[in-house]
């Protein structure tokens, strides 16, 4: 248990803001351009052992050769202090943290139903989200260019016309919103999308002409999003995290019905003890009531968006894939 609470401590402090005086953003000053033909520039790939392959002790590993769906995962911000606006993908210490935390506790959530692809990208420093500046926007645009390049490489060399699930959190969702617009907001590509789990950042319905939020547990060719806050908390100042659409990750609906999950929360991937969570949609964000020790002391539960509903998401992903494949056959 101590190990898990250390993990929570790392997460809860990874979004801390360090006010830094960074130089004017210049693309040429950002480090180590990714080469997605190099397997080392992917944090996770199918048919090899990496952080996305972790499974709870009571589960049996399913061979990647048996999975009919791909999962493209975009990780959140763990780059909170540095000399450049965008992270260096050759930063071994940062990559180790990415592999040990978001890959292990978010990307691995989908390894029972899909082959998981996680590209390294030069994520923007957390300061990008704390200041409205030209430099910050240029850094985020630069980071997205890496994500887009990785996805284009994936489509050309790895996908082979397989159905796709997009998974993202926080800064990952910031980029995934545009990725959906650039690639999936067309009838042909929409049909390839099982579902996009784009969590923990503002999403607006108006961004898309064709894509819609999922409104039922088994709806496909759509996206789900939510931002988690403590029950009865007024999230007005936290609009960075939520927009005008929210799906309840227990009911998987858009309505305001309150729902409870007695075994949804993941504390430690190798421990059976779980906590209680109850959620309902309030003004386009998610109110959560839980007895999980760390979460009880927080009002903004952004960094626990996946953990609070880990088993619910895992179950839903499997059911949604089954529904997708049944409709296709």
Image (cartoon, helix red, strand yellow):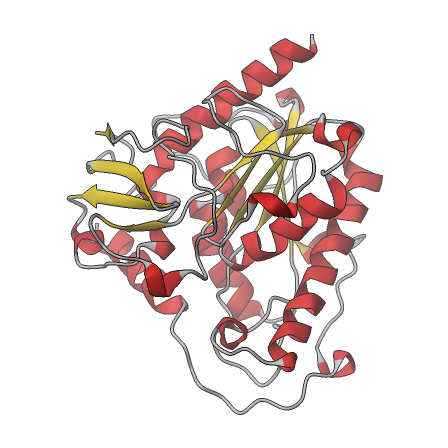
Instruction: Please tell me which residue is depicted at 80% across the width and 47% down the height of the picture.
Output: 152
The answer to whether residue 326 shows anywhere in this view is yes
Work out whether 132 lies above or below 94: below
Q: Can you tell which quarter of the image residue 84 is in?
A: bottom right
Observer-nearest of 272 and 246: 246
Q: Quadrant of the C terminus?
A: top right
- Relative image position of residue 252 (x, y in whole percent): 41, 28
Looking at the image, residue 249 lies above or below residue 174: above
Is residue 265 depicted above or below 152 in this figure? Answer: above
Residue at x 68% of width, y 83% of height: 25
- Tell me if 135 is positioned left or right of 78 in this view: right
As drawn, is 153 to the left or to the right of 250? right
Q: Residue at x 34, y 40 (%)?
A: 269
The residue closer to the viewer here, 319 or 201, is: 201
Among the 4 quarters of the image, the one containing residue 57: top left
Rendered location of residue 328, percent (x, y): 69, 12
Looking at the image, residue 233 sits to the left or right of residue 147; the answer is left
Q: Residue at x 50, y 71 (%)?
A: 129
Residue sitting farthest toward the right: 156
Q: Quadrant of residue 157?
A: top right
Q: Is residue 212 above or below residue 3?
A: above
């Amino acid at each position: 248990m101590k190990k898990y609470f250390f993990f929570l401590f790392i997460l809860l402090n990874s979004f801390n803001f360090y006010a830094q005086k960074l130089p004017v953003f210049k693309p040429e000053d950002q480090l180590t351009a990714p080469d997605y033909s190099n397997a080392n520039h992917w944090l996770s790939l199918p048919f090899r052992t990496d952080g996305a392959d972790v499974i709870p002790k009571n589960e049996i590993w399913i061979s990647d050769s048996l999975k009919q769906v791909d999962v493209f995962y975009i990780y959140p911000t763990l780059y909170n202090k540095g000399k450049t606006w965008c992270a260096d993908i050759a930063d071994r210490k940062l990559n180790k943290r990415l592999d040990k935390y978001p890959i292990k506790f978010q990307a691995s959530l989908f390894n029972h139903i899909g082959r998981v692809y996680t590209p390294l990208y030069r994520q923007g420093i957390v300061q990008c989200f704390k200041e409205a500046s030209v430099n910050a926007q240029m850094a985020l645009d630069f980071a997205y260019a890496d994500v887009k390049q990785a996805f284009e490489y994936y489509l050309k060399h790895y996908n082979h016309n397989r159905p796709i699930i997009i998974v993202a959190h926080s800064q990952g969702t910031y980029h995934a919103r545009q990725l959906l617009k650039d690639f999936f907001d067309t009838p042909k590509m929409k049909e390839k999308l099982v579902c996009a789990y784009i969590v923990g950042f503002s999403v607006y319905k108006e961004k898309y002409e064709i894509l819609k939020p999922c409104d039922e547990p088994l709806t496909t060719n759509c996206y789900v999003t939510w931002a988690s806050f403590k029950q009865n908390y007024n999230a007005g100042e936290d609009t960075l995290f939520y927009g005008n659409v929210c799906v309840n990750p227990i009911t998987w609906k858009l309505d305001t019905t309150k729902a409870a999950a007695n075994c949804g929360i993941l504390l430690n991937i190798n421990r059976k003890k779980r906590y209680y969570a109850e959620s309902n949609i309030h003004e386009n964000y998610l109110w959560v009531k839980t007895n999980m020790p760390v979460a009880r002391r927080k009002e903004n539960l952004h960094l626990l968006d996946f953990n609070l509903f880990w088993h619910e998401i895992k179950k839903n992903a499997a059911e949604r894939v089954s529904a997708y494949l049944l409709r296709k056959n």
